[in-house]
Amino acid sequence: MAEDFGEGSTAGMDEYETLMATTDVELLKTALRNEKAAPEILQIQTQLVKRAREQIQLMEETVEEFEQSGMDPLTVSLYQMDLDRAQFLLRSYLRIRLQKLEKYMFYIWKDDSLRNRLSEPEIFFVKRCIDDMEKHLEETVLSKLPDNYQSAGRQSIISEEDDMVPEPQLDTFVACKSSNRFVSLRLVDRYKSSFFWHLLSLIFSFFQKQVCKFAFINLQWETFGDGAP
């Protein structure tokens, strides 16, 4: 016997399925993979994060409505699985960015181009972290050192650069898939002529992927924008 869950439930299901038919979940998976692979912070996907939050809110309302209306538990569990997956992807993406911000906060803060990659809440978070860290170091360590060594970023006042600030390793090798505008990404390394690198290049080419230093990819990103690999 068919059950009538009301027009509200039907409308909610239609709206939910329409949103899930979009590619935002796949885009979020791509953003998560890119952020995981990149040694430095990437541009925040503001609109994608906003849409993902809206979809998660709609999914939560839909699941709650289905549970209250007595819908088949199996159907509800499938919708709940989609909800859990979307929440996991969004939380993982934001968590990885927070980990980078905590580790490289001084490095990011002194570079305008890196600060521009952050959202407003992330900028506020980094500023608070830096203020708290500097205050803690000043009260516990720096105030007890000679004047020449009372810097949180330099070993001494004669240092020309912030030699105590952690920086991401941009020479890290990453696997990537190039966009249509790039025919090939060259292997940038002193061992690129070796048999190992030729074999590795052939394997990745077979799967339409490349391996190279992140610094090279980052250069293409800065040159071509979001369309870069």
Image (tube, rainbow, N blue to C red):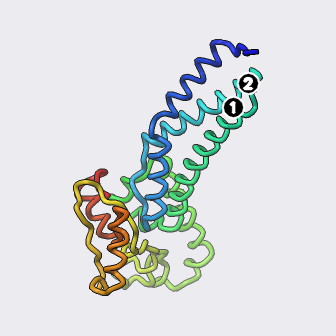
Left or right of residue 117, residue 102 in this image = right
Where residue 36 sits: x, y (%)? 49, 62
Q: Residue at x 54, y 38 (%)?
A: 53
Q: Residues within 10 Å of mark 2 (few under 14, many from 20)?
A: some
Quarter the C terminus occupies: bottom left
Q: Residues within 10 Å of mark 1 (few under 14, many from 20)?
A: few
Q: Residue at x 69, y 31 (%)?
A: 75
Residue kind at label 1, given as amino acid type: Thr
Where residue 141 sits: x, y (%)? 59, 78
Q: Residue at x 74, y 20 (%)?
A: 69
Q: Quick check: 196 above or below 4? A: below
Element under disc 2: loop
> Badges 1 and 2: C-beta atoms under 8 Å apart?
yes
Where residue 102 sits: x, y (%)? 53, 64
User: Which residue is more in the foreground, 174 or 121?
Assistant: 174
Residue kind at label 2, given as amino acid type: Met
Q: Quadrant of residue 171?
A: bottom left
Residue designated by label 1: 75
Where residue 8 sits: x, y (%)? 63, 15
Residue designated by label 2: 71
Report how far apart the C-alphas of labels 1 and 2 lie in the structure. 7 Å
Quarter the N terminus occupies: top right
